[in-house]
Amino acid sequence: MKARITADQHLLDSNRRSEWKQKDAWRTLRILSEFVDGFDTLSDIDRAVAVFGSARTKPETPGYALAEEVGAALAKEGFSVITGGGPGVMEAANKGAAEAGGESIGLGIELPFEQGLNGYVDIGLDFRYFFVRKTMFVKYAQAFIVLPGGFGTMDELFEALTLVQTKKVTQFPVVLLGTAYWGGLVDWLRGRMLEDGMVNPADVELMLVTDDVAEAVAHIVAGCNTKPGSGGDAAMPS
Ligand SMILES: C/C(=C\CNc1ncnc2c1ncn2[C@@H]1O[C@H](COP(=O)(O)O)[C@@H](O)[C@H]1O)CO
């Protein structure tokens, strides 16, 4: 299959400086329209949790089953489930949510290879720009649950932690699901990174690490300060 050039690639390509003046100003209009579409489509979400994890997790594996369980548990608690709309953990979480009668949302991304949203998405959007899509995850979810994954998952996790650490978002629980997978990273964060003074002790406590889906959901219910039917409204911290 032939890889196509994506909008992100065009924007970030530093080899065609001659095009920057002429094309980038116009490109901002496309970026703006992506924000407008996202805000327009997603603003009616009551309350939601974003579920992240590997695009490579196969159906019929424990990781897929775990993500399905997460999607279903969140739906039963009245949360919409937002994922990246792709395969693997994203598909499984959307499936769990949809089959439990919840709202299943997929925010897809244009990739060099044709993909499309997974078949369990009720409300779907396809983004050309990664950074626009990432804004939507943080804006419309009140918490993140992160299952095992690769670079994409790490990017989403560390963006959330940075936003919480810098208080750009408040009352935003982050749960790492899968102690065997996350343990090594968490030990390093709480060991080397903390010992070398790269973070504060409070920073490394920003996430809950667990294997228990019920504990994950209870942590989110306790920490995100929105009630079902509140339209996501909560008192702003002073
Ligand atoms: C690599 C494969 C498919 C890629 N398709 C994706 N579709 C949607 N979102 C994706 C995709 N790949 C990565 N993402 C985002 O990053 C996270 C997963 O990345 P990881 O590197 O696999 O951990 C995920 O949460 C998405 O938001 C295989 O068919």
Image: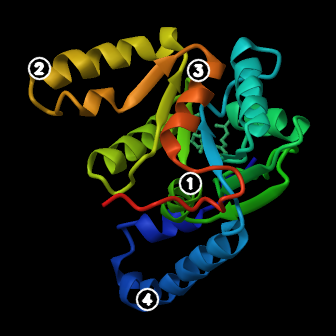
Q: Earlier in the sequence, mark 3 or mark 2?
A: 2
- Name the residue: 39% across, 54% down: 169
Q: Kindly report which numbered mark, 3 or 2, lies closer to the viewer in this rendering.
A: 3
Rendered location of residue 55, percent (x, y): 65, 34
CB within 8 Å, label 1 to label 2: no
Q: For disc 1, does the CB lie below 8 Å from ligand 1?
A: yes
In space, the residues marked 4 and 3 are separated at their CA atoms by 47 Å
Question: Residue 38 at what x, y percent from top left?
Answer: 64, 70
The residue beneath circle 2 is 195
Vertical order, 108 against 15 (above or below): above
Residue with the mark numbered 1: 137
* Cα–Cα gap, marks 2 and 4: 45 Å
Could you say which quadrant of the image residue 71 lies in? top right
Q: CA distance from mark 3 to mark 2?
A: 29 Å
| Residue 128 visible in the current orientation | yes
How far from the left and from the top, in percent, is residue 141? 58, 51
Q: Cα distance, mark 1 to mark 2?
A: 32 Å
Residue marked by disc 4: 25
* Label 2 or label 4, whichever comes before in sequence order: 4
